[in-house]
Amino acid sequence: MNMIDVAKKIKVHNFSAGPGILPEEVLQQAAEACINFDNMNLSLLEISHRSKNFEKVMDEARALVLEHFEVSADDYDVIYLGGGASLQFAMVPYNFLKTKAGYINTGVWASKAIKEAQKLGEVKIVASSEDKKFGYIPKNYEVPTDLDYLHITSNNTIYGTQYKSFPKVNVPLICDMSSDIFSRKVDAKNFSLIYAGAQKNMGPAGATMVMIRKDFVEKGKDKLLTMLDYKTHIKNGSMFNTPPVFPVYVVMLTLRWLKKIGGVSAIEKINEEKANLLYNEIDRNSMFEGTVFAKEDRSNMNVCFRLRNETLEPEFDKLWKEANISGLRGHRDVGGYRASLYNALPIESVKVLVDVMQEFERKFA
Ligand SMILES: *Cc1c(COP(=O)(O)O)cnc(C)c1O
């Protein structure tokens, strides 16, 4: 039996928030590359990152990011780094915070980014939704024009909120897109820097993608520690030191898969369909309620909800576990439930969850 047949037989509906679900065919190809990569009769795990075979992988993984974002290699560079999105919380201010940086606080990850920046310079919290437990995206705030940059978090993985439009600003805009990158069309040209840990929506843990405008990187500080200086990695084509070889390969496969199924605009439609299906059921079903009170800000990636009667949690848990659903528990800070509908999650899995919710209502309402 090949790996795809094995995966099909297992049929677990994987709603994990991260690391998240990957396409079956990507897992199959990744498994093969561990044994025999590129017909070399060697594993991808045991060859030089300087080999022609891997250089091709790195080049394609970088080019596919530009292609999916519809930007040019004349304007942007793409690199892959270790350290997760969390290292970017530090690298961004370390490279670009000279006098004052602005941050919008929309949740745990945004707060962590703010904390790092505060260690390195002056931070202005331009807007925050902390007053209402991060249940909305701030709107109608003024962005000072004297900032080195404004940092935002496009999708708040833990609370389930998402920017539906981005602030129009006259300062460089930097975005943590870890949990919704390539899930929908964005106008990437409005951003000076976009970063994303791969493990939510574009690959496995271990690689973080950073895309930076060339004219912005030139404004970075001088005399930085070599490994923490974006210029080092850009100058060396993301090969200054040994890059996360295997994660970069799986990212490349995932971005190829996305291209094959029609690209970002095609997946955006499917993601909307999946999210609508689930939100409609949450709103209709008498047993559940959504936890994001600002409906217009509800995330299409991480759908957060809870039982109106939380004492019934063991009964609901039993039902969804019997249906081979996995990874539905909410973040430990929020509780309740969170269904992550990343690109690779088939709509059939959402239908199974909706069926379970309806069965729960029939039995316990
Ligand atoms: C998961 C997540 C992070 C943290 O990513 P690491 O790669 O674990 O450091 C940062 N930002 C967002 C939006 C996330 O969802």
Image (cartoon, rainbow, N blue to C red):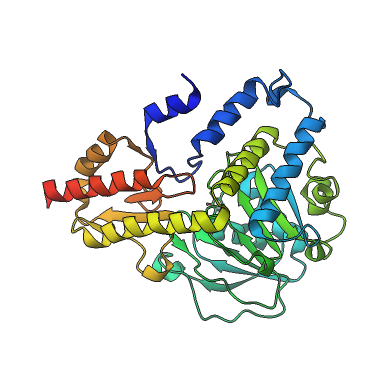
Q: Nearer the viewer, residue 220 or 280?
A: 280
As drawn, is 188 to the left or to the right of 281? right
Query: For the point 43% across and 50% down, which residue is it?
Result: 341
Q: Position of residue 190 (x, y in %)?
A: 67, 69
Question: Residue 340: percent from the left, percent from the top?
Answer: 42, 49
Please determine whether, in this image, residue 281 is positioned above or below residue 57. Answer: below
Specify the quadrant of the image occupied by residue 222: bottom right
In the displayed structure image, the side of residue 282 where residue 6 appears, left or right: right
Q: Look at 78% across and 62% down and name the residue there.
A: 75
Q: Is residue 254 above or below residue 195?
A: above
x, y percent for residue 358: 20, 50
Q: Nearer the viewer, residue 200 or 225?
A: 200
Q: Give the residue displayed 83% in from the left and 61% down from the top.
A: 221
Residue 186 visible in the displayed image: yes
| Count of all numbered marks drawn on residues in the image | 0
The answer to whether residue 159 of the structure is visible from this angle is no
Image location of residue 349, percent across then percent down: 35, 43
* Residue closer to the observer: 349 or 201: 349
Locate residue 360 relative to residue 258 in the image: left or right.
Answer: left
Residue appearing at x 69%, y 78% in the figure? 170
